[in-house]
């Protein structure tokens, strides 16, 4: 059983690293964005609620986000562990996740914090925007997203630090170097790699 959370600002590479680590440990990577898109595509009741909120240009409320994630973590492939990416993203969601896991007599084994300097995040997002032809990723928009991360998501790391489960990983380097750093930190905690899902 390996239950992980990966946290980092936009442009830190957490989506890419999350998938790599999940594969290495034989657990599903559970990204809130993917879960929302899946629920919307499947036309579930939760998916319809999420779609209406997103179409209105609003943020999905904590309770609904938590309900969607709980539903995903209750699926069979997540029975032996999971890697969360994008949830919890604030203190209220940490409480929701704690309550859900305690109900299953479980807890997170480790929180991977990808540490990337702000300038590096901005440079990576700008490069990705240019490569994908996205005009909405202006420096102002990127700076705003990073400010939201610093204000709302960074504080959850303090909660997890008091529990002694945060591994701060240098997020600058090649993809393989960063993956190796994460894997080494998790193995140092006694978390063994599993077979691929």
Image (spheres, grey):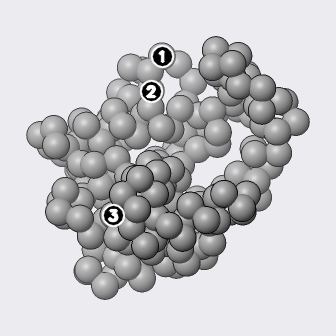
- Provide residue 38's location: percent of width, then percent of height: 40, 53
Task: Judge left or right: residue 120 versus residue 18.
Answer: right
Q: Residues within 10 Å of mark 1 (few under 14, many from 20)?
A: few
Comparing labels 3 and 1, the label whose residue is closer to the camera: 3
Q: Residue at x 69, y 19 (%)?
A: 133
Residue 156 appears in the picture as rendered? no
Q: Residues within 10 Å of mark 3 (few under 14, many from 20)?
A: some
Report if the CB atoms under discs 2 and 1 are less than 8 Å apart. Answer: yes
Q: Is residue 63 above or below residue 155?
A: below
- Provide residue 115's location: percent of width, then percent of height: 60, 38
Q: Residue at x 82, y 45 (%)?
A: 144
- Provide residue 100's location: percent of width, then percent of height: 37, 79
**Residue under circle 1?**
174
Q: Which mark is residue 72?
A: 3
Query: Residue placed farthest to the right in the image?
Result: 140
Query: Which circle's residue, 3 or 1, is located before the other in the chain?
Result: 3
- Provide residue 103's location: percent of width, then percent of height: 31, 85
How many angstroms separate mark 3 from mark 1 (CA)?
31 Å
Which quadrant of the figure has residue 170?
Answer: top right
Question: Which residue occupies the foreground of this view, 147 or 188?
Answer: 147
Q: Is residue 88 above or below residue 136?
A: below
* Helix, strand or loop at mark 2: helix
**Residue under circle 2?**
178
């Amino acid at each position: 059983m390996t239950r992980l959370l990966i946290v980092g600002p936009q442009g830190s590479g957490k989506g890419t690293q999350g998938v790599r680590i999940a594969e290495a440990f034989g657990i599903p990577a559970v990204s809130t964005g993917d879960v929302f898109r899946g629920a919307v595509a499947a036309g579930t009741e939760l998916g319809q609620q999420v779609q209406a909120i997103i179409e209105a240009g609003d943020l999905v409320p904590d309770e609904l986000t938590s309900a969607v994630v709980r539903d995903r973590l209750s699926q069979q492939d997540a029975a032996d562990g999971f890697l969360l990416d994008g949830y919890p993203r604030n203190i209220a969601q940490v409480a929701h996740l704690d309550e859900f896991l305690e109900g299953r007599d479980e807890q997170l084994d480790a929180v991977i914090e990808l540490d990337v300097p702000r300038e590096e995040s901005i440079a990576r997002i700008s490069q990705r925007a240019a490569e994908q032809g996205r005009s909405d990723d202006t420096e102002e928009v990127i700076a705003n997203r990073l400010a939201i991360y610093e204000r709302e998501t960074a504080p959850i790391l303090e909660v997890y630090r008091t529990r002694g489960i945060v591994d701060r990983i240098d997020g600058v380097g090649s993809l393989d170097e960063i993956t190796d750093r994460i894997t080494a930190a998790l193995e140092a905690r006694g978390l063994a790699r599993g077979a691929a899902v």
